[in-house]
Amino acid sequence: MNEQDNGGAALANGADKTPVAGMISQYVKDLSFENPNAPGIFQSQAMPRIDVQFNIGTLQIAEDVHEVILKIDVRSETDDGVAFVVDLSYAGLFGLRNIPEEHVQLFLLGEAPRLLFPFARRVLADTVRDGGFQPLLLEPIDFNALYMQQVQGQAGGEVPIEDIGHA
């Protein structure tokens, strides 16, 4: 009997070496919203300056399971003071099986954040809105391109890959 005729016994025995990567779960790991100058800041007519920074961290939880944390820090200021500060750590657990070692980091720092970002973006927008401001809608981010830039920069002795960048 060959592998195709055995009703999946090869899969149960771990003989299948097909690469598999998938999200197991996702969650808010940490969320902080500050509105230090309320209620006075709501009287301000000045245009806010918004600074958005992000970072990606990974942690191996088990042999085939990794946690990816997308950290987004937002600070909004006007000439009248700080409007709001949001710190969000949005995480996901990812299962990786039979992925070549040279592709693991690309997945964890490029593809996994791309999968997490739309959900983190919604949490961020809802938090800012619930804080009394217009929802903050971040533009999509090409994490794969940022990862490749970091790899090229690191080859030249520049920034560590985990510090993927700033928006």
Image (spheres, rainbow, N blue to C red):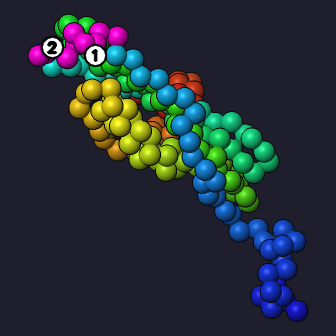
Q: Are marks 2 and 1 in contact (CB under 8 Å)?
A: yes
Residue 54 picture quarter: top left
Q: Quadrant of residue 68?
A: top right
Q: Main secondary structure of the magenta part?
A: loop
| Earlier residue among tags 2 and 1 | 2
Q: Nearer the viewer, residue 123 or 131?
A: 131
Using a 10 Å C-alpha cutoff, classify the residue at mark 1 as few (fewer than 14 neighbours), some (14 to 19) or many (20 or more).
Answer: many
Observer-nearest residue: 69 or 156?
69
**Magenta stretch, residue numbers:** 36-46
Q: Residue at x 61, y 57 (%)?
A: 22
Q: Rounded to the nearest whole Å, what is the CA distance between mark 2 and mark 1?
A: 9 Å
Q: Residue furthest top?
A: 80
Amino acid type of the residue that numbered disc 1 sits on in the rendered structure = Ala
Residue 143, x across and y down, in percent: 45, 43
Give the residue number, with chain letter if any, for mark 1.
Answer: 83
Identify the residue under disc 2. Answer: 44
Task: Judge from the rendering whether residue 108 lies leftward or rightward of residue 87; answer left or right.
Answer: right
- Comparing 109 with 151, the one in front is 109
Q: Residue at x 64, y 36 (%)?
A: 58
**Residue 106 on image: x %, y %:** 58, 46
Residue at screen point 88% across, 92% down? 1
The percent coordinates of residue 48 (x first, y second) are 21, 19
State the SS at label 2.
Answer: loop
Local SS, label 1? strand
